Image (spheres, rainbow, N blue to C red):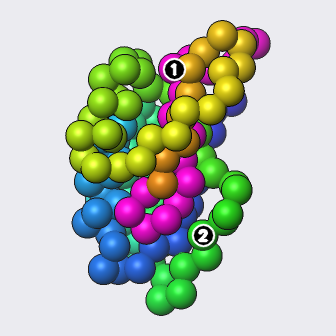
Amino acid sequence: MTLNHVSLETRREDVDAEVAFWALLGFDQVQPPPGLRGAAAWVARDGTQIHLLYADDPVVMPRGHPAVVVADYEAAVGRLRDAGLEVRPTEEHWGAARVFVQTPAGHRVEVMAAPPPP
């Protein structure tokens, strides 16, 4: 079983910055199906999607977050820093580095060098 997507609420005016953020982690913008266009912007990578749902007053969880594993952790963290984002290293688990970063719209995202062992 694979997680297909997560949804994050985002103001329409923040969508371009959010799409650019996810591009730093290897996600490309994709078109939603015709019946869902106008309600959200989507980004995708390797079969996983982030749906940026348009909301006038988005809910941003203070601690809840999506987590993504990146193939080249150091390069991804470097891209985030180069984009001017604050990257906050946190305790390693199972020997793998990980950081937290906040998207332009304020969503907390965990970036991981490796997934947990099975």
* Direction from residue 63 to residue 51 in the image, left or right: left
**Circles 1 and 2 in contact, beta carbons < 8 Å:** no
Pick the residue in front: 67 or 36: 67
The residue indicated by pointer 2 is: 60
* Direction from residue 75 to residue 89 in the image, left or right: right
Residue 40 spot, x, y in % from top left: 41, 71
Residue 93 spot, x, y in % from top left: 71, 20
The residue indicated by pointer 1 is: 113
Q: Residue at x 66, y 21 (%)?
A: 92
* Direction from residue 60 to residue 73 in the image, left or right: left
Q: Kindly report the distance in space between the C-alpha atoms of the residues bearing marks 1 and 2.
A: 25 Å
Residue 28 seen in render: no
Label at residue 56? none
Kindly state the secondary structure of the residue where label 1 is placed: loop
Pick the residue in front: 109 or 2: 109
Q: Residues within 10 Å of mark 2 (few under 14, many from 20)?
A: some
Pick the residue in front: 75 or 35: 75
Q: Amino acid at mark 1?
A: Ala
Kindly state the secondary structure of the residue where label 2 is placed: loop
Q: Main secondary structure of the magenta part?
A: loop
Q: Is residue 36 magenta?
A: no
Circle nearer the N terminus (1, 2): 2
Quarter that holds the C terminus: top right
Residue 66 spot, x, y in % from top left: 59, 47
Q: Residue furthest right?
A: 118
Give the magenta-colored segment's residue range: 103-118
